[in-house]
Amino acid sequence: MQLFWMMAMMIVIGAAIGGFTNSLAIKMLFRPYNAIMIGKFKLPFTPGLIPKRREELAVQLGQMTVNHLITKEGLQQKLQQSEFKNELVTWAQGELKKQLEQDCTLNDLGAFFLKQEDLDVRVEGQLKTYLNQKISEKITAVEAKPLNEVVPEAFINNVEAYIPKTTDFIQSRLIAFVRSPEGKQQLKYLVDDFLADRGMLGNMINMFLGNESLIDKVQSELVKLLQRDTVSAMLERVLKQEWNELKEKPASDIIDFLKLKSGQDYVIDYLVRQVDMKSIFNTPVRDLIAQHIPYLEEDLIPHVTDHALNWVGNNVEQIMEKMQLSELVRQQVQTFSVQRLEEMVLSISRRELKMITYLGALLGGGIGFIQGLLVYFLT
């Protein structure tokens, strides 16, 4: 009986010591949180291991995250998984539908994202300014150049090709005018003025030939004259000469003649008004892109997602370097209080730590049992 009580006492004492020491060791990982000073001397083993090594722990966690947890290869493999791509496409399509279900307009989006009220007015003003600037730049750039260097070569060729047709048109219109009653009346005025300036000679010619007969003869001869090929050739030569001179003139002469600068603002205002910015920016986005929604959902989103994931995968190393994940983890760990670190570790491994305490008690109890046997046999 005495042996039983001695063995039981040894086992209980050994288990208590083993469990207590393991529990104390676990506690000393975190506690005390701060160093304990006795006068000028610091009490050994204070603060606890983790508070004392928090800086090193933060650095090691950062390196472990980059080198073993969030690695380039792991991220690339994740980005290339078809399941992940499909999930991302499905999410994007759902977000698009969710946004389109709202009756938001471009003005609403501008007010929300850009903090700009009446975005249509702003865009219209910016468009006018942009067009004015670009047109002014173009005009300034070509003013000193001759016309044949400004206009397209195809336009010049077309004009030169139409000169013979223009000549025929002018000749035919002149003949038609001379033959018309209006033309005949104009010829009568010209002949009367001509004869009146000749005094007696003019009166004699008019008396012998008669006014109407003279006009008919002049009209007939003038028509014959206009129908000659030499007249046609002369007209074509004059037109070509004028066109060649016009081509060599600086573009500024044409710009001033057509008053392009003074009419620039009016033309731009007219063109911008035709766009009707107010109506566009106050129409729900859903209605603006209604006919393109199937394309956005079925083609554009998968295409953009695939290219975006490929780009991220190809540049993941540079992205990770720019993000400085190890430094980010280190900074975050350093901001944690020791109490929070303790709670995090215990929330993950509380059961295992208890098992370590129980294992210490079991080993202590085993050692106590062995000690009891040794004491019994030795004594």
Image (tube, helix red, strand yellow):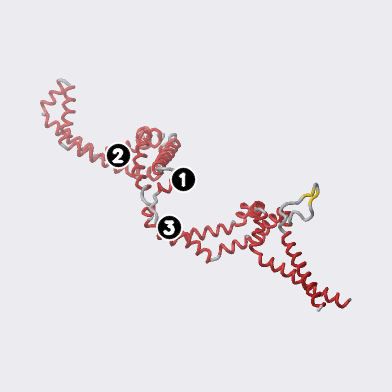
Residues at discs 2 and 1 in contact (Cβ within 8 Å): no
Residue 27 sits in which quadrant?
Answer: bottom right
Front one among 127 and 178: 127
The mark lying in front, picked from 2 and 3, is: 3
Look at label 2 and name its amino acid. Answer: Ala
Closer to the eye: label 2 or 1:
1
Query: Which kind of residue does numbered mark 1 sit on?
Result: Leu
- Which residue has dot 3 on it? 98
Secondary structure beneath dot 1 equals helix
Write down the residue under mark 1.
114
Q: Residue at x 82, y 77 (%)?
A: 2
Picture quadrant of residue 142: top left
Place of residue 107 in the rendered image (x, y in percent of width and height, measured from the top left):
40, 46
Q: Secondary structure at mark 2?
A: helix
> Nearer the N terminus, badge 2 or badge 3?
3
- Asked if residue 149 can be seen in this view, the reply is no
Q: Earlier in the sequence, mark 2 or mark 1?
A: 1
At numbered mark 3, what does the secondary structure look like: helix, strand or loop? helix
On screen, residue 297 versus residue 161, left or right, reads: right
Q: Are marks 1 and 3 in contact (CB under 8 Å)?
A: no
Gap in angstroms between the C-alphas marked 2 and 3: 74 Å
Q: Position of residue 1 (x, y in %)?
A: 81, 79
Sequence-first disc among 1 and 3: 3
Q: Position of residue 18 (x, y in %)?
A: 76, 67
Q: Around disc 3, counting alpha carbons within 10 Å, would you say few (fewer than 14), some (14 to 19), or many (20 or more)?
A: few
Q: For label 2, count other residues whose C-alpha is less than 10 Å away and answer few (under 14), some (14-19) or many (20+).
A: some
Q: Label 3 amino acid?
A: Lys
Return the residue found at the far right. 379
Q: Which mark is residue 233?
A: 2
Q: CA distance from mark 1 to mark 3?
A: 21 Å
Please report the residue visible at 76 percent of the width from the left and 70 percent of the height from the top.
Answer: 15
Task: Locate the C terminus and report the quarter of the image it occupies.
Answer: bottom right
